[in-house]
Image (spheres, rainbow, N blue to C red):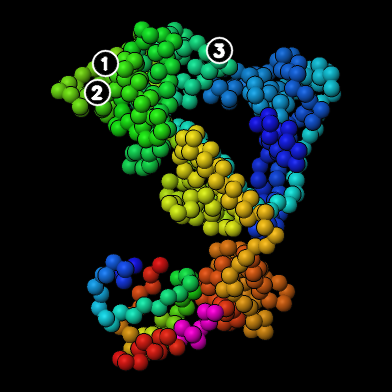
Amino acid sequence: MAGTIRAQYPATIRPIRINCTGRVTPSLIMRAIGRGADGVIVSG
Amino acid sequence: MLQAARTLRLNIHSYSELEEVSGFVGNFNVKIRKKARYVTNDCNGCGACTEVCPAYGYDEFNEGMNSRKAIYIAFAQAVPSMAQIDMMKCIKCGLCKTTCELNAIDFDQKDEILDIKVGSIMVATGWDEYEPETGYLGYNVYPNVITQMKLERILAPNGPTIGHLARPSDGKRPERILFIQCVGSRDLNKNMYCSSGVCCMIAIKNSKLIKQHYPDSEISVAYMDIRAAGKDYEEYFTASRKEGIRYIRTNVSRIKEDSETHNLKILMQNTLSSDELREREFDMVVLSAAMVPAEGIEKIQKILKLENSQDGFFKEFHSRLNPVDTKIPGIVLAGVAQGPKSIAETIAHGRAAASSLSRMMSKDKYRILLIRAIVDKEKCAKCGLCELNCPYDAISLKPDGAEVDEILCRGCGTCLANCPSEAITLRYYREPQYEKQIDAILEEI
């Protein structure tokens, strides 16, 4: 959506598509933070 | 209905309730509780029993405005035309049993549980009229304040007054009638939604009907907005205005009763004119109450595992792109079960639901995606967390580990996020795939 309406957002935000927010495991979030991400937004 | 009852291979289970549903599209197992009528199928609806019955109850079909016997036929055109006994009112005198020539009365009848297999399910639970709380606009306090449904029964030829317009307090014909619109709808404290213009059109219809019968009637409609959106609706509304029905755009401020005449004094102001706040007197007030989901909808929602919209009606697959199907394959919605609708819209919706099902049922195959959860039974600790968390009821715990029903599973992955033993994976969306994506994105930091 953000892309089709050409919304501006920082280039440092990287989306990953998942099937359902229920699919997100804590270990995936911890992995991202462990590798240096400042935060993780889980949105559905 | 009569034609449906005569159709071969179409079984109607009236006076029955849904108890349990298991299985999946094309293969549902349904448990139906056929409630005891205390009358066997030999009954041909002759009505001899109702004539001799000495016990009375309120007639639900006529909104409780007249009485019926404890043994009764629900209403004149009921399908099947069979008597039933209201055991709360029955005095068990046995007069009906001795009168019945077909020996159809059975006081010992028990509820029957039927197990049937069906391929698909259509939910058509309909609606109930919103019941205003006691005292709101004088409802249940002043006898001449009634709801639209009661007026509908009063005007009906098979209603409590055999079609004669009579007000409840003295049985006289009300000459000055006020309709109050949007009772319980378009109201932030009650129901936010508009009942789809249905109450507007019913108020217009009934005011026209009364005016046709008694041209000297003074009929006013107190409204917020008249929603006459539909084919020929606006013309109908304009015609009613030409016939002399007055439309007052207002919010009723106060309603009081003259204790002697039982007439109603209503304080309101026409906001579309220079009219001031003033009191007008009416003989009867009709509340156009909202359409609300039918009683018992929560039970069916739990049994079928359907979702509800905010307004309490069943949630469709998509409110604009697919208002017929539900999230569960093989279950569709028809009519007001999905949201308030007029008769024409209900018929169109019902036909759409039927064609959606027949398109699916006429094929021999049902295609599913392969994105499904897979259980590694060696790792499974049989804790049952997945079974508890699955929104689609697709996982069950078996002695050798959790088992996924490939048809019920929708591949959401909630089970594997909850699995403490990491025994579940999602086909095509496995953990290492995501880990690689995260690593690649964060490599540059």
Judging from the image, mark 3 belongs to the subunit labelled B
Q: Is residue B198 visible?
A: yes
In the image, residue B445 sits, relative to residue B240, either above or below, namely below
- The crowd level at tag 3 (other Cα within 10 Å; few <14, some 14-19, many 20+) is few
Whether pointer 1 and pointer 3 mark residues with C-beta atoms closer than 8 Å, the reply is: no
User: Going from the N terminus, do you reach mark 1 or mark 3 first?
Assistant: 3
- Front in this rendered view, residue B92 or B227: B227
- Secondary structure at badge 1 equals strand
In the image: residue B216, left or right of residue B427: left
- Front in this rendered view, residue B342 or A44: B342
Judging from the image, mark 1 belongs to the subunit labelled B
- Secondary structure at badge 3 equals loop
- The residue identified by callout 1 is B280
x, y percent for residue B4: 68, 34
In the rendered image, which quarter is residue A13 located in? bottom left
- Identify the magenta region: B428-435
> Residue type at mark 2?
Met
CA distance separating discs 1 and 3: 30 Å
In the image: residue B327, left or right of residue B167: right
In the image, residue B361 sits, relative to residue B172, either above or below, namely below
CA distance separating discs 2 and 1: 8 Å
Judging from the image, mark 2 belongs to the subunit labelled B
* Rendered image: mark on residue B162: 3
Most extreme residue toward the left, as rendered? B274
> Residue type at mark 1?
Arg
In the image: residue B329, left or right of residue B79: left
Which residue does the image show at 65% across and 58% down from the upper left? B25
In the image, residue B340 sits, relative to residue B106, either above or below, namely below
> Residue type at mark 3?
Ile
- The residue identified by callout 2 is B268
Quadrant in which the N terminus of chain B appears: top right
- Secondary structure at badge 2 equals strand
